[in-house]
Amino acid sequence: MFTPSSGIKVYLAIGNTDMRKAINGLSILVESSLSLDPFSGSLFVFTNRRRNILKILYWDRNGFCLWQKRLEKHRFRWPEPGCKVLEIEGQELFFLLEGFDLSRIQGHKRLSYTAIA
């Protein structure tokens, strides 16, 4: 099971991606279409039109890694198009891989403070 560590950035490429693309093609998409750095160590997630294949590209110290999951019966519940890329958290990626609909899952909002008192 692929389990991303907490604190790692995860980007979903919204829309359809040609799943014949491998590391080189996907890293070019990250840089040119999504305007992100493929060497950042972030996870970049892609899916096909049928939503039954998901690929995750990431840079690990000295090379790219490509992880793939193909569903035999079900479909991934992919967010609707509205932008080119959507940033999610590692826990949300776990939910997506497990088949949950991200638009229906709502946790506590993240708090950010600048001072104690």
Image (cartoon, helix red, strand yellow):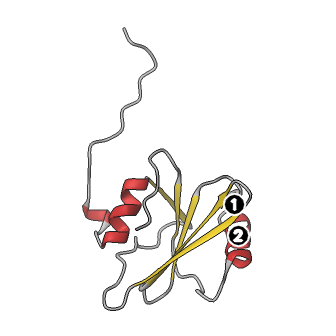
Q: Residue at x 53, y 82 (%)?
A: 16
Which is nearer the N-term, disc 1 or disc 2? 2
In this orientation, which residue lies closer to the viewer: 14 or 57? Answer: 57
Regarding mark 1 in the picture, which secondary structure is present there? Answer: loop
Residue type of the residue flagged with mark 1: Pro
Q: Residue at x 48, y 88 (%)?
A: 49
Q: Residue 76: x and y, percent?
A: 37, 78
Q: Which residue is mark 2?
A: 27
Q: Residue at x 47, y 68 (%)?
A: 82
Q: Which residue is mark 1?
A: 38
Residue 109 placement, left or right of 35: left
**What is the distance, in whole Å, between disc 1 and disc 2 at their CAs?**
6 Å
Whether 9 is drawn above or below 109: the answer is: below
Residue type of the residue flagged with mark 2: Ser
Q: Picture quarter containing residue 21?
A: bottom right
In this orientation, which residue lies closer to the viewer: 38 or 69? Answer: 69
**Quarter that holds the C terminus:** top left
Regarding mark 2 in the picture, which secondary structure is present there? Answer: helix
Pointer 1 with pointer 2, Cβ within 8 A = yes
